[in-house]
Image: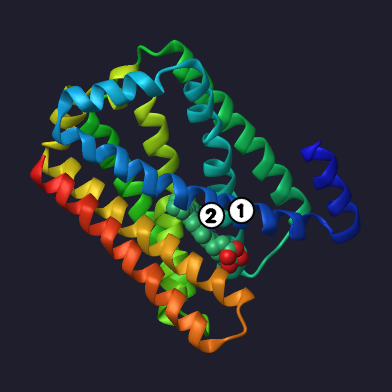
Amino acid sequence: MILRILSSYATTRGWPYVLAWCHRIAGLLLIGYVWFHIYTLLSLSSPPRYDATMKFYGFFLFRILEWALAIPVIFHALNGGRLILYESFETRDDESMIRWLLWLSALYVALLGALMLIGNQSVSAVFFWLTMIIAGLTLAYGVASKVWAIQHSLLWKLQRITGAYLLILIPAHMLFMHLNYAMAHEANTVAMRMQNYFIKAVDISLAVVVLYHAGYGLVSFIGDYLESRTLRIGLAGLVILVMLLFAAVGIRLTLVI
Ligand code: HEM
């Protein structure tokens, strides 16, 4: 059904139009998930409560939803990467880029599903995150050096640079959390990892960067549909407040654990 609707739009409007809408919808879904994720992590202050919540989310249906979350995540990440590539290097080959985007997304979703089924993998958290941070910062630096020359606002440039950082960090975060069940679902395992100062820095950078990127996205999304300047400014202020609130909660949680 969904595929039929997508392909009918693709025939009349073209794939780039369909992908732009999917990108937007995936971005909005991810905002909802990030808020929910930070809210769930708050129960880490009481390990039995966190374990009980995770036990509830351990039911089959929630495990399927957890896996399905990989679809908007990897789609938005890779499609965002494709857009950044166009904007930074000004070359486009829509057809092959879109094919790559869909195949790599399917591969990632299958890999995550396989890891969730195997469920007994492990890796040193510091080694894993050090590698990912180096890759994320290198990519962000590469994009920064390109988008800096583009005639756009600083905030727009920062959204693209944060997108590049997240392109590595977000899919890595999901993979890491599903290497084995305890990694994200047992309060003691999660808390022990988060007590490491390097991991604290990684988590705080992730919270700040995600909330900035998502906040900017939401404000520009709202701006596209509202005529009234007063309403636009009012809603932008509200988005900034909510994002700041979640950032403060996330940072506090990371520091006190
Ligand atoms: C994982 C790596 C990510 C990359 C590479 C990325 C990249 C991008 C890019 C390039 C745009 C601009 C699209 C445009 O103007 O046409 C964008 C928009 C957006 N992003 Fe991301 N993003 C990522 C993660 C996230 C996350 C985790 C969230 C939410 C928590 C998010 C939320 C949004 C929103 C709401 C928009 C605005 C959508 C629109 O108006 O079309 N992004 N992203």
Spatial CA distance of label 1 from label 2 is: 5 Å
Q: Are marks 1 and 2 in contact (CB under 8 Å)?
A: yes
Residue 149 vertical placement versus 83 (above, below): below
Give neighbour class at mark 1: few <14, some 14-19, many 20+ (Cα, 10 Å). Answer: few
Give neighbour class at mark 2: few <14, some 14-19, many 20+ (Cα, 10 Å). Answer: some
Q: Quadrant of the C terminus?
A: top left
Q: Is residue 72 visible?
A: yes
Secondary structure found at label 2: helix
Residue at the image point whose x is 52% and y is 43% from the top: 73
Residue 138 vertical placement versus 202 (above, below): below
Residue at the image point whose x is 19% and y is 41% from the top: 199
- Side of 67 where 168 appears, left or right: left
Residue 239 vertical placement versus 201 (above, below): below
Ligand 1 closer than 8 Å to label 2 CB: yes
- Side of 142 where 13 appears, left or right: right
**Total numbered labels placed on residues in the image:** 2
Secondary structure found at label 1: helix
Q: Looking at the picture, tell me which residue is in the foreground, 158 or 246.
A: 246
Callout 2 amino acid = Leu
Q: Looking at the picture, tell me which residue is in the foreground, 157 or 89.
A: 157
- Where's residue 147, x and y in %? 48, 73
- Side of 101 where 136 appears, left or right: left
| Rendering quarter of residue 123 | top left
Disc 2: which residue: 28
Q: Is residue 169 visible?
A: no
Q: Looking at the picture, tell me which residue is in the foreground, 217 or 235.
A: 235
Callout 1 amino acid = Ile
Residue at the image point whose x is 48% and y is 13% from the top: 117
Identity of the residue furthest to the bottom in this view: 229
- Where's residue 119, x and y in %? 39, 14
Disc 1: which residue: 25
